[in-house]
Image (tube, rainbow, N blue to C red):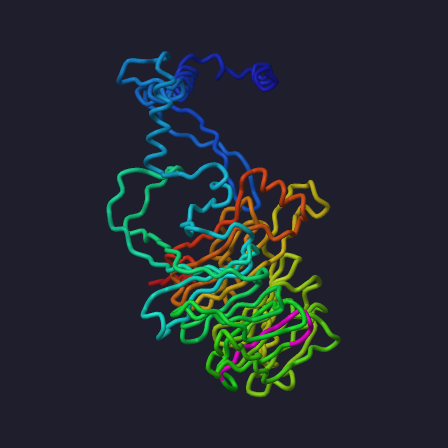
């Protein structure tokens, strides 16, 4: 109004002209008739906002949209009275096509990955895929998981390509890709222990599974005869267990009692009537009686993260003395560690939602850095506008990239060399406690189970909501592979 009065006061005559106003009026009427604005919500890891999307809509599509909103069927002639039948038919078609799980399952498995059958009934503590080129596996892939329900379970996992063309769309409105691989899992064996197991690993030839847990004992489970026997003993629960061929074939265990022990398993298994005591080869006592909170072994390198935030690196050719020892640059409790595939360094996760990349050689220490992860933006409701979650586990892909899982309920794929994030999953209603890649990196297993970072009250809430631990297996489809650098433009 102010602009119009000012124009009239200045003697302008453009508002009085009939011809310029007529096209403008027609343009407004045309845009209101054939265009509508849809409000869609864009969900991201740290951002939620609404945007308007303009799309052209014809008269027939507008009628169809109104019919869908009213629940009727235009072809059957029921405009308003057939809402119940139309809605029921649509729900049946949606269920038949998408095979969607119930609401609780959707919250625990937002990525709609394959769920392993017969999962543990309590929280999952560790996952491990069978080793590559194992003579005892005959080209098969197995996955083992330990749980707080005192069980150790093993599945045979396979994957095949689904080349059938797709004639429907997913619930997100995107057509399924042809050739999308399908994951299958088949439970093959289970062992019941006297106390909850905390860790598991594989023998290098794939013929046996190593187990350590809260009964202060380490076990070896032979799959051929389904026999399990003790091979290690500590004064406190065993946090991590590994098989190593250096300096000789042995089992390495790290415990809360502040020791790392090497055990001989080359002797023939004793008879059940007269079991023999485990044969101890060597013992490493950590400085200050600190506990083993995280540990990893690869090749001749062993990395131990202690309760006083120290990183101790050992050369297994000479394990009597530490090769390197330092205090972590992370400020909170160290929770997970994984060694590079080339054994030149390691990645360490902590409760502060950060991962530290540490190189072993002094010449490469200038490459050390840390990055933030598994944090949720609270948009001003928290002091620093961010909720920080622990990094529960780290696993390396054969290509050199890595995966992290956290208590925020998500998993992420990272490329440490390019310092970039490759993928971030949707957040689950439960924390992701552990993860593992298979030998060739085509499968990624992760467990959605409570890690007790919010105490007993949260466990009761999840139980009341009917949310149970789940073991998901995902076909990576190149998601964890490093992205090729963009070629520089060529000027002619």
Quadrant where the C terminus sits is bottom left
Residue 462, by quadrant, is top right
Residue 257 falls within the magenta-colored stretch: yes
Count of labels in the image: 0
Magenta-span inclusion, residue 101: no
Residue 304: give x, y in percent of width and height: 62, 73
Is 71 on the left-hand or right-hand side of 392?
Answer: left
Q: Residue at x 56, y 43 (%)?
A: 47
Say above or below: 254 vs 381: below
Q: Where 422 falls versus 100 (above or below)? A: below
Residue at 52% x, 44% y is: 44
Residue 453 picture location, percent across and down: 65, 52
- Residue in front for this viewpoint, 162 or 274: 274
Taking 89 as reference, is 188 above or below it?
Answer: below
Point out residue 34 in the picture as x, y percentages from the top left corner.
37, 22
Q: Which residues are magenta?
A: 249-259
Relative to 34, does residue 262 appear above or below in the rendering?
below
Q: Quadrant of residue 326?
A: bottom right
Q: Position of residue 230 (x, y in %)?
A: 54, 73
**From where the camera sits, is residue 287 visible?**
yes
For the N terminus, the image quarter is: top right
């Amino acid at each position: 109004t102010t602009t119009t009065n000012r124009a009239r006061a200045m003697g302008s005559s453009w508002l009085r002209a009939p011809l310029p106003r007529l096209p403008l009026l027609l343009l407004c009427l045309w845009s209101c008739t054939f265009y509508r604005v849809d409000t869609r919500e864009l969900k991201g890891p740290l951002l939620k906002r609404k945007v308007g999307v303009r799309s052209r809509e014809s008269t027939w599509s507008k009628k169809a949209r109104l019919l869908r909103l009213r629940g009727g069927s235009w072809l059957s002639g029921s405009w308003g009275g057939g809402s119940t039948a139309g809605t029921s038919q649509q729900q049946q078609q949606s269920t038949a096509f998408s095979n969607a799980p119930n609401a609780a399952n959707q919250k625990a498995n937002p990525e709609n990955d394959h769920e392993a059958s017969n999962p543990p009934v309590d929280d999952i503590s560790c996952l491990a895929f069978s080793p590559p080129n194992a003579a005892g596996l005959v080209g098969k892939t197995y996955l083992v998981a330990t749980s707080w329900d005192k069980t150790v379970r093993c599945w045979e996992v396979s994957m095949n390509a689904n080349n059938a063309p797709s004639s429907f769309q997913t619930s997100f409105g995107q057509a399924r890709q042809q050739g999308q691989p399908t994951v299958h899992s088949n439970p093959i064996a289970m062992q019941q222990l006297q106390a909850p197991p905390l860790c598991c690993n594989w023998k290098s030839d794939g013929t046996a599974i190593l187990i350590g847990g809260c009964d202060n004992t380490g076990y070896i489970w032979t799959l051929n005869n389904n026999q399990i026997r003790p091979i290690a003993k500590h004064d406190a629960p065993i946090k991590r267990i590994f098989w190593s061929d250096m300096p000789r074939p042995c089992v390495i265990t790290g415990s809360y009692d502040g020791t790392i022990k090497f055990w001989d398993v080359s002797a023939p298994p004793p008879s059940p009537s007269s079991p023999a005591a485990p044969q101890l080869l060597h013992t490493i006592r950590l400085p200050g009686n600190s506990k083993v909170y995280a540990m990893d072994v690869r090749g001749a390198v062993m990395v131990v993260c202690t309760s006083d935030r120290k990183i101790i690196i050992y050369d297994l050719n000479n394990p009597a003395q530490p090769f390197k020892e330092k205090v972590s640059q992370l400020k909170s409790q160290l929770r997970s560690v994984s060694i590079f595939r080339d054994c030149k360094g390691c990645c360490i996760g902590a409760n502060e939602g950060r991962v530290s990349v540490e190189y072993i050689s002094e010449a490469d220490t200038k490459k050390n850095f840390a990055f933030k992860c598994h944090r949720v933006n609270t948009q001003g409701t928290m002091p620093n506008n961010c909720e920080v979650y622990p990094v529960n586990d780290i696993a390396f892909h054969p290509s050199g990239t890595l995966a992290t899982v956290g208590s925020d309920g998500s998993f992420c794929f990272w490329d440490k060399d390019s310092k970039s994030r490759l993928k971030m999953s949707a957040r689950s209603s439960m924390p992701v406690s552990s993860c593992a890649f298979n030998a060739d990196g085509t499968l990624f297993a992760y467990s959605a189970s409570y890690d007790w970072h919010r105490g007993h009250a949260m466990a009761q809430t999840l139980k009341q909501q009917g949310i149970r631990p789940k073991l998901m297996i995902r076909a990576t489809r190149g998601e964890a592979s490093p992205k090729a650098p963009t070629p520089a433009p060529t000027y002619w």
